Amino acid sequence: RAIKPGQRVVLQCSETANFVICYFVVLNIGAVGIAVSTRLNQEELEFVLSDSNACAFLYDSKTAAVGQSVAGGEGAELMKANVDHLIPDHFDSMELDTVPRGPGDEALWVYSSGTTSRPKGIVHTHRQIIECCRFHLDALQLKRGDKIFCTSKLSFAYALANALLAPLRLGASVYLHPDWMTLDTVRSVVLREQPRVVFGVPSIYQGLMDESQSTDESTFALPEYFVSAGEHLPSNVRKRWLQLTGRTIINAYGCSETLFLALAGNARTTPPNSVGMLLPNVTGELQGAATDNSEISPRQGVLHLAHPYMFTRYANRDADTAERLVNGHFNTGDLYRQDVDGNWYHMGREDELIKVSGQWVYLREIEKAGRTMTAVIDVAVVGAKDDKGMLRPAMFFASKDSVSDKESQLRMNQHLKSKLPRLKRPSWIRVLNEFPRTANGKLSRARLQQMVAGQAHD
């Protein structure tokens, strides 16, 4: 059966040429492409299929076990096909006519990572993307034939926009890897393919340095530019990377609602802990977030963005759309401040401020204190409701120490007593061997909250 213009097609595929061909064919025939993580399980996948009211589902040989068993939403039977069979069987000799679409017609959806709640379908329409490529042209000086490599997957808006759509629009080449990235995979790809630009996330850069090998210094000096987005980039990670490789990580910021980047620095003049400046055609304003916390600058506020590739709505969530998208400006929920030179600094999330005994407590400040303890690998602090329904900070951390979890907790507790007033100390301290993550690899704060929710304090 033919897929009609405007109908939605979900793709759960490894990153191969077959997947990219099918994704662009979907857009070419006027349908709406929805690429999702290969790590979604059957329940998560069926939620996306139902939420999007998809008419078709494309999978590949690696995702076939789940793909063949899923059912669609209500209504017509879900069309399903394996792209590894579809390409050679149909597309080699098939000519497809481009279906004209206007700038108001849906082009693609991306689903949020679901770090704090159910993933949201974020709807984007057909737009001219060249005005979203200024970062690639100005900061990266991207030109025809340059090779791009991204450690994140194309179901992640960061990778889809900045490491596929923009490079191809500018005539660059994109290296795709079908498997999920390990540190060894990243090393081997960079050494073998020698991309000019690498897009990554802070945890990748941190991991590569924590497990650095003797060849890393020369290997990671091969690319000219490294870019980081998707999560907060600590300034010490940027500093250590420069010492190891001689290359500066360019910090950047975007979100699924803008698809493309909104803020970015450069390798020469941006301060180490800044996300740089607003990109051309992007406007940003700070709206006040009242706080009496000493760690928060009174000049900061919640960043509201107007962007040339702004989303139009959250699918099936009118209330969320009305709350976040007002008069063409998107409320990012991110706290920022801007210095006198125009550089922007990410200060955390609006929901990382919680009130304890009537006073504001900044969760990122507690994380920062926890990271100063010797042998700590990583720290995350979330707000969770205790057995009395009060919102309190909960700390989770991983450690290199070979002592018991109980001993690690006691050591962290003593450490925090010397760093924070009683009001700001976490009500729970937990040791984790591995942090829970979403299908896109982001920290799942919702699952951390569930680990202590409704419990009495330690």
Image: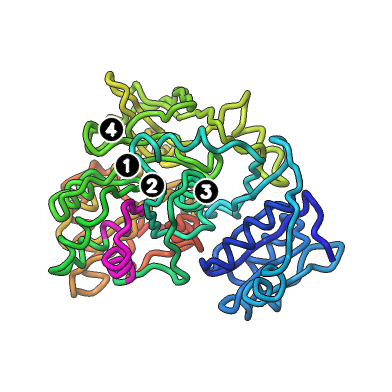
Q: Position of residue 86 (x, y in %)?
A: 68, 73
Give the number of the mark in front: 3 or 2. 3
Residue of label 2:
229
Where is residue 342 shown, x and y percent of the image?
32, 22
Magenta stretch holds residue 203: yes
The residue where tag 3 is placed is 165
Residues tagged 2 and 1 counted as in contact (Cβ below 8 A)? yes
The residue tagged 4 is 295
Instruction: Name the front one of labels 1 and 3.
Output: 3
Between the C-alphas of marks 2 and 4, the distance is 23 Å
Q: Does label 3 or label 4 sit earlier along the sequence?
A: 3
Q: Residues within 10 Å of mark 2 (few under 14, many from 20)?
A: many
What's the residue at 47%, 70% (across, down)? 178
* SS label for mark 2: loop
**429 part of magenta stretch:** no
Q: Secondary structure at mark 3?
A: helix
Residue 77, quarter of picture: bottom right
> What residue type is disc 2 on?
Ala
Label 2 or label 4, whichever comes before in sequence order: 2
What type is the residue that disc 1 sits on? Asn
Q: For mark 1, what is the residue?
A: 251
**CA distance separating discs 3 and 2:** 16 Å
Marks 3 and 4 sit apart, C-alpha to C-alpha, by: 39 Å
Element marked by disc 4:
loop
